[in-house]
Image (tube, rainbow, N blue to C red):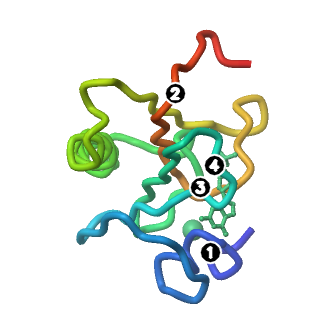
């Protein structure tokens, strides 16, 4: 799939609307369309990367940025102390359906492990 057809690139450029909760020069965070928990936020890099499987050493800063942003959003929304789960579904067996790297930030209920 080309970047032009990527739904998350369209969310970054505003072609597809989203409920944004955070944005900076590197990433955008918005509510998942089909929430799996009371809070379900997706954090994505503005620059297209297919998946975690495609990242390399020069993506270190972006990956760190996504996780630090998750921690900041959790603190900002007041659920850091109760806890939350961060998930990066990767490729087919990982359950990835949108091939633009994204971090799921889930909170507001207790999660089981291992996930299904
Ligand atoms: P994946 O299964 O690839 O890890 O996660 C993709 C996520 O993107 C799913 O949780 C799905 O609900 C969400 N999603 C797919 N399309 C859209 C959209 O157009 N807008 C928003 N906000 N979320 C979407
Ligand atoms: Zn994309």
Of residue 43 and residue 60, the one placed in the foreground of this image is 43
Of residue 46 and residue 31, the one placed in the foreground of this image is 31
Mark 4 residue's CB less than 8 Å from ligand 1: yes
Q: Which mark is residue 35?
A: 4
Q: What's the distance in space between the residues labelled 2 and 4, CA to CA?
A: 12 Å
- Mark count: 4
Residue 29 image position (x, y, % from top left)? 40, 61
* Dot 4 or dot 1, earlier in sequence: 1
Q: Is residue 14 left or right of residue 50?
A: left
Does dot 4 land on a helix, a strand or a loop? loop
Q: In the displayed image of the protein, which residue is found farthest to the bottom?
A: 15
Q: What's the distance in space between the residues labelled 4 and 3, CA to CA?
A: 22 Å
Residue under the point 65% across and 82% down: 4
Q: What's the distance in space between the residues labelled 2 and 3, CA to CA?
A: 29 Å
The residue identified by callout 1 is: 3
The residue identified by callout 2 is: 109
Q: What's the distance in space between the residues labelled 1 and 3, CA to CA?
A: 9 Å
Mark 1 residue's CB less than 8 Å from ligand 2: yes
Disc 4 crowd rating (10 Å Cα; few below 14, some 14-19, many 20+) is few
* Dot 2 or dot 3, earlier in sequence: 3
Residue 65 image position (x, y, % from top left)? 26, 49
Residue under the point 45% across and 41% down: 105
Does dot 2 land on a helix, a strand or a loop? loop
Q: Is residue 110 left or right of residue 36?
A: left
Asked if the residue under mark 3 is in contact with the one under mark 1, i.e. CB atoms within 8 Å, the reply is no
Q: What's the distance in space between the residues labelled 2 and 1, CA to CA?
A: 34 Å
Disc 3 crowd rating (10 Å Cα; few below 14, some 14-19, many 20+) is some
């Amino acid at each position: 799939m080309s970047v032009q057809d990527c739904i998350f690139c369209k969310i970054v450029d505003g072609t597809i609307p989203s409920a944004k909760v955070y944005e900076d020069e590197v990433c955008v965070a918005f509510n998942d369309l089909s929430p799996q928990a009371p809070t379900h936020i997706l954090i994505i890099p503005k620059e297209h990367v297919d998946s975690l499987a495609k990242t390399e050493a020069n993506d270190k800063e972006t990956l760190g940025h996504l996780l630090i942003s998750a921690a900041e959003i959790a603190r900002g929304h007041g659920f850091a102390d109760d806890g939350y789960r961060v998930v990066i579904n990767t490729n087919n067996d990982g359950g990835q359906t949108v091939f633009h790297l994204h971090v799921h930030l889930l909170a507001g209920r207790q999660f089981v492990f291992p996930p299904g």
